[in-house]
């Protein structure tokens, strides 16, 4: 077996988040569905930017946020995602490397500009996202480094990446290499709208064992199985997936295996400032727990702690050392 270089390698959209506070009236005026992610073109991106209030630019992208969390927990982390060789592309590359993540995907010299996501945060901490995928859509199977995949304990794939055809091929190539090297592959379903578009394909990935671990929130779970009944959806997931984690915001999470379902409480928070990245950072903690050989319950508790840190400030990446936070809370990292 190839020697391990990374604990977790993530593959996803390389995006710069443009975050602004707003209210429900602005969302209604802009015909946005609160709490969801919409894909937009460059013209719509410009219109939203002109209309929104003062903003903060930070590197983001769902899997990239997870991998930044993995690094903050002290694990060895790598990320694969495409930017253009432009100002925002350089911002993204600098930020993820500064977070301690190995990032070697070559930037595109031509084509669309670096992806950006306009994140509108309402006073209740809910985030509504509008994403221009730009260069991120041009991730190609050639960008997948077989040696890096084989040398990673866990491969983490974001569902958002399932939109562009070439990125989809890259995703499947990585999963095949990982399994050939006896590594596990995790998938986050990313968004209920994403599940609506690719339900049959996601179910196929789960049922065929292309992915070994599935992360989903309640809304995504309901969408996947097209039922409003939670227990019906949960039972279906138990039958389909080797391992799944269903996140439920303040209700914590459920770790689902074929044999049992284990409920793990959320970590307490003083105040929810911005829910952006809660699922991403939960995944970081859970994956690091798995890479360290902990049991599922301990991994879920570590995920809950990482999620609690990120929702107490603006932005989707940790502002403090998650490793130190975890050690202060009794985790052996």
Image: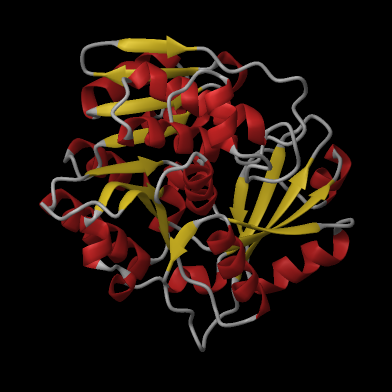
Which one is nearer the viewer's eye here, 69 or 274? 69
Q: Quadrant of residue 329?
A: top right
Residue 272, image x, y percentages: 74, 27
Q: Residue furthest bottom?
A: 110
Residue at coordinates 75% horizontally, 33% vertically from top-left? Answer: 125
Q: Is residue 292 above or below residue 158?
A: above
The answer to whether residue 155 shows anywhere in this view is yes
Q: Quadrant of residue 214?
A: top left
Residue at coordinates 58% horizontally, 23% vertically from top-left? Answer: 328
Which one is nearer the viewer's eye here, 168 or 287? 287
Locate residue 132 relative to residue 300 in the image: left or right. right
In which quadrant of the rendered image does the C terminus lie? top left
Residue 240, image x, y percentages: 23, 28
Q: Is residue 69 above or below residue 107?
A: above
The answer to whether residue 227 shows anywhere in this view is no
Locate residue 325 relative to residue 28 in the image: left or right. left
Residue 229, image x, y percentages: 44, 15
User: How many numbered dots are placed on residues in this image?
Assistant: 0
Q: Is residue 84 above or below residue 284?
A: below
Residue at coordinates 60% horizontally, 68% vertically from top-left? Answer: 94
Q: Quadrant of residue 254?
A: top left
Q: What colour-coding does the image apply?
A: secondary structure
């Amino acid at each position: 077996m190839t020697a391990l270089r990374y604990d977790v390698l993530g593959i996803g959209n390389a995006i710069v988040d443009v975050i602004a506070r707003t209210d429900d009236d602005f969302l209604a005026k802009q015909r946005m569905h609160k709490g969801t992610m919409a894909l937009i073109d460059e013209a719509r991106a410009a219109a939203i930017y002109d209309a929104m209030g003062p903003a903060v630019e930070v590197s983001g992208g769902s899997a990239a946020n997870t991998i930044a969390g993995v690094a903050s927990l002290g694990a060895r982390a790598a990320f694969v995602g495409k930017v253009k060789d432009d100002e925002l592309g350089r911002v993204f590359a600098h930020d993820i490397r500064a977070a301690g993540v190995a990032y070697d995907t070559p930037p595109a010299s031509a084509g669309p500009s670096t992806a950006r996501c306009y994140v509108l945060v309402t006073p209740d901490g809910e985030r509504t996202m509008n994403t221009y995928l730009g260069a991120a859509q041009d991730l190609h199977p050639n960008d997948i480094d077989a040696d890096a995949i084989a040398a990673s304990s866990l491969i983490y794939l974001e569902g958002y990446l399932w939109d562009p055809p070439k990125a989809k091929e890259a995703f499947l190539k990585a999963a095949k290499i990982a399994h050939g090297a006896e590594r596990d592959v995790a998938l986050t379903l990313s968004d209920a709208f994403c599940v609506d578009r690719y339900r049959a394909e996601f179910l196929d990935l789960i049922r065929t064992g292309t992915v070994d671990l599935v992360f989903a929130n309640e809304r995504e779970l309901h969408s996947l199985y097209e039922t409003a009944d939670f227990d019906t959806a949960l039972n279906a997931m138990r039958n389909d997936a080797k391992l799944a984690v269903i996140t439920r915001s303040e209700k914590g999470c459920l770790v689902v295996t074929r044999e049992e379902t284990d409920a793990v409480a959320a970590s307490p928070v003083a105040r929810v400032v911005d829910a952006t990245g809660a699922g991403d950072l939960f995944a970081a903690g859970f994956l690091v727990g798995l890479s360290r050989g902990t049991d599922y319950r301990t991994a879920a508790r570590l995920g809950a702690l990482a999620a609690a840190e990120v929702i107490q400030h603006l932005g989707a990446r940790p502002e403090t050392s998650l490793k130190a936070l975890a050690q202060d809370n009794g985790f052996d990292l």
